[in-house]
Amino acid sequence: MDNPQPKVSDCEYGWVAGFFDGEGSVLLSIRAKAGKGEGPKIQPQAKVTATEVEGLNALTTILDKAGIAYHVVWYQPKGQMKNGNSYKRAWCMTIAGHKRCCRFFQWITPGLYLKKERAEVILDYMSLRQRHSDFRTPIQEDEIALALKLRQLNLKGKAQPYTEALRLNTERPGASSEKLAANGLKGAFARWGIRN
């Protein structure tokens, strides 16, 4: 007999959507130079940061029921409050990577209010990335445009111009043609099945 996963109730779903609307972040992290071709890399992420352990327990219980993977880290924020006391110990829950974020944002976006537009931008980005048959395909101009749009939404119109010039890598994923030539036909054949 099957052991069905517990279902998330409407009340629990609404609580997570509200909690994420208030405490969460929708991110497309941009690394200007990454990988072999030193083209940009963009990683989708959802983050929630807070201090109360009860909120963390409720959130992780509901995400477990929904089958959403996450990572939690506890940390001590640096600095002090105006009254001289140290900040409370905090936790940060991260959902990172294309597949995990796709699953999370497809699930949570209908229930969002404040962050709905941002969630739709990240879903549009992930939809564009899914059109590539190879995950190593270099980032395209329309994908960078969505990442920069999300950055502006997150900074509420106060976004500074992106200071790092983003040079698109237009080479096909994998080893460069010079490297393949140095390795001989074996390398090209092993990677792409090409024989001369």
Image (spheres, rainbow, N blue to C red):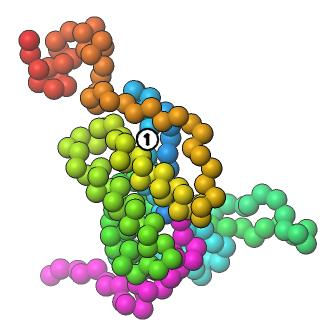
Look at the picture and state if 110 lies above or below 140: below
- Image quadrant where residue 159 sits: bottom right
Residue 158, percent across and down? 64, 58
Estimate how packed mark 1 is, as few (under 14), some (14 to 19) or many (20 or more) residues with alpha carbons within 10 Å.
some
Image point (48%, 85%), residue name: 15
Look at the picture and state if 36 lies above or below 89: above
Whether residue 47 is visible to the viewer of this picture, yes or no, is no
Image point (78%, 67%), residue name: 87
- Specify the segment rendered in magenta: 1-25
Residue flagged by tag 1: what amino acid is it? Answer: Lys
105 and 189: which one is in front?
Answer: 105
Look at the picture and state if 52 lies above or below 151: below
Residue 82, percent across and down? 88, 69
| Residue occupying the far left of the picture | 196
| Residue occupying the far right of the picture | 84
Residue 27, percent across and down? 49, 58
Residue 151, percent across and down? 53, 55
- Answer with left or right where residue 190 lies relative to residue 102: left
137 and 52: which one is in front?
Answer: 137
The quadrant of the picture occupied by the C terminus is top left
Q: Is residue 24 magenta?
A: yes
Q: How many marks?
A: 1
- Image quadrant where residue 4 sits: bottom left
The quadrant of the picture occupied by the N terminus is bottom left
Whether residue 87 is visible to the viewer of this picture, yes or no, is yes
Q: Is residue 13 magenta?
A: yes
Q: Which residue is mark 1?
A: 41
Q: Secondary structure at mark 1?
A: strand
